[in-house]
Amino acid sequence: MLNDAREVPDGTLLETDVCIIGGGAAGISMAREWAGSSLDVTLLESGGLASDPRTQALYRGRVFGRSYFRLDEARTRHFGGSTNCWHGMCRPLDPLDFEERAWVPGSGWPFGLAELRPHYERAQRVCGLAAFEYGAERWTLEGEPPIAFTDDAIESRVFQIAPRRFASLYGQALERARNVNVQLNANLIELEADADARRVERAQVATLAGGRFAVRARHFVLATGGIENARLLLASRGVRSAGLGNDFDLVGRHFMEHPHLVAGAWLPSSASIPIGFYRPRRAGEIHVAGLLTPSARVQREERILSFASFFSRAAELPDFEGRLTRFIAEMDGAPDPASRAVFFMNEVEQAPNPWSRVRLTEERDALGVPRVQLEWRLSPIDKRTLWQGQRLLARSLGRAGLGRLQVLLEEDEHSWPANLGGGRHHMGTTRMHVDPRHGVVDANCRVHGVANLHVAGSSVFPTSGSANPTLTLIALALRLADHLKRELR
Amino acid sequence: MKRGLDRRALLRGIGGAAALGSVGSGLLGLVGCGPSGDLETGLAACVADAEAARVVGAEVLVALGPSLPTAAELAQRLAGAARAEWEDRASTDRARLFEAVLAQHLADFDAGRLFGVRGWLLSQTEAQLCALVARRRPAEV
């Protein structure tokens, strides 16, 4: 059922088995899991069926320090969430991303890829993707092979691309499900806990029309995005002044993005080196595009993070490069020097950094919820990964006689160029760890110390890898749904 | 050597000193074997497109700093401990000299011995080779 929360009488107490807060990729994926079952599910969505400036403005916040997108423009706040505007770039995390890496403080998930793999396969179907295959071999087209490196430092993989709008895709099914109550225009303003903060008793909900009501549930799932999940926990301070689940001052810390930067230009040794593998191309019902990423071996040896390099644009060669291309073609034994260079966009893993964080400010939004301040802080290893990664790419290309790479950034550990951007990927603010001193949620995404409060979304990622987060957060949400199904038996 | 010839294929075809004897002087002529070339001249002859190499080499020299190395010094840096062997190859067998240069160039990438020119990461060997060409008078190349 799709309902409008503005029609719920003031003071109503809705009773349900599971209350999911947030109708984006994670929330909708979870709600579908119960559609048609014997359990009652209530899904609270802040927005309606279309974008609304007043609702979107609830995201407003401050950005302190490193420049970042305006927070009210970084996510989409209506039914479907940011799947209303995403590009559908999907890729799973790599096995190494789950491991504890001695050179990455705070790394290590409570489980490995094998645990998440069956959920990834389900997430593929939810996203309307092809089979769970991301190796280059599977997606190689005749005449458009991946780059033939002669070492194993850099590997070719693919994105599967399917920008499905979840509200369009699944809205009707949720509307038909009599046991799923989707409340549109329903904003969580506080989670009210019992006296010991060991259980959430009620979710207090408000509408921009002035209505107020509450939801009581056996289990609550916070699925409002990487910044809002932290914000709502911090703002739920009726019992604990530091907020729910924040006994160890971890909520909001370890905010991670994927720094995005054009950091390298490739001058192929030959005009006839095929690069179509790396361009977005149709493959059945989806698109795929190749990318380059460092192997696990080289990440270990170089003590760097992961990154993904993909082609952005090509450019004609200026005078110097016009000579350089002739010389390189000669050295690499190519009969036809390239006439264009190809720029690499890099999407870099960011190491967990407790000083990169979301916190509340004194300012409040239209519903009285404190607004946030985002302080996005990068670490030396993030920068080193970027330039060391470009050097590795340069070495592999040169070694294979495939051309040379130009590094477009300073080789230091602190400075970042002005064109540094992000992917609007908000991760890590309610990180997962088995030990409550190191994580906000446990391996089942349950908030440590709060028996019936769970978090879905990329805010639970302890580390981010270099893969876009949506596929992984959906896999985790499906895994959480399975866990709750067992709990609710 | 004519520009555009696939030198890697050439080297594969040569396949070492034993094979060279049977390949004959035609290939040696392609790589500019002279009867008594010194190391510096032999190295410069490894580059067919001297104009392109000179432009790149000029930038390498800028990056090297104010104390400009001579062509002879650059030849010494390139050859390093293998100088005697390279000199021998330069005077008798420039195909094998180029083979050695190319092997060192590839080993540079393996070992991370890179040289930045306007941000382009070249192997140290190819960067020094370009600098050597740039330090020689055009008529000498």
Image (cartoon, rainbow, N blue to C red):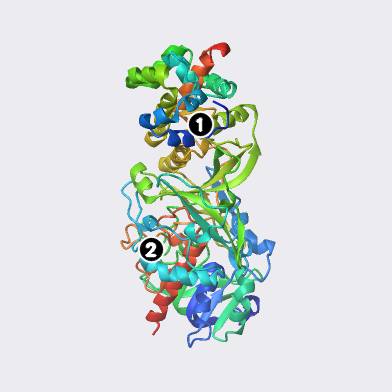
**In the picture provided, is A85 more to the left or to the right than A463?**
right
The answer, for residue B89, to whether it is visible in the render is yes
Residue at horizontal 50 percent and vertical 74 percent from the top: A30
Residue type, numbered disc 2: Leu
Chain hosting mark 2: A
Residue type, numbered disc 1: Met
**In the picture provided, is B31 more to the left or to the right than A3?**
left
Residue at horizontal 45 percent and vertical 64 percent from the top: A237
Foreground residue among A60 and A482: A482
The x and y percentages for residue A176 are 61, 84
Circle number at residue A261: none
Task: State which quarter of the image contains the N terminus of chain A.
Answer: bottom right
The x and y percentages for residue A204 are 52, 72
Residue assigned mark 1: A331
**In the picture provided, is A49 more to the left or to the right than A382?**
right
| Residue A207 placement: quadrant | bottom right
Task: State which quarter of the image contains the C terminus of chain A.
Answer: bottom left
Label 2 to label 1: alpha-carbon separation:
42 Å
| Residue A435 placement: quadrant | bottom left
Label 2 vs 1, first from the N-terminus: 2
Give neighbour class at mark 2: few <14, some 14-19, many 20+ (Cα, 10 Å): some
Residue at horizontal 58 percent and vertical 28 percent from the top: B3
The x and y percentages for residue B42 are 46, 18
Foreground residue among A119 and B123: B123
- Position of A459 relative to A328 (above/below): below
Chain hosting mark 1: A
Foreground residue among A457 and B132: B132
Residue assigned mark 2: A113
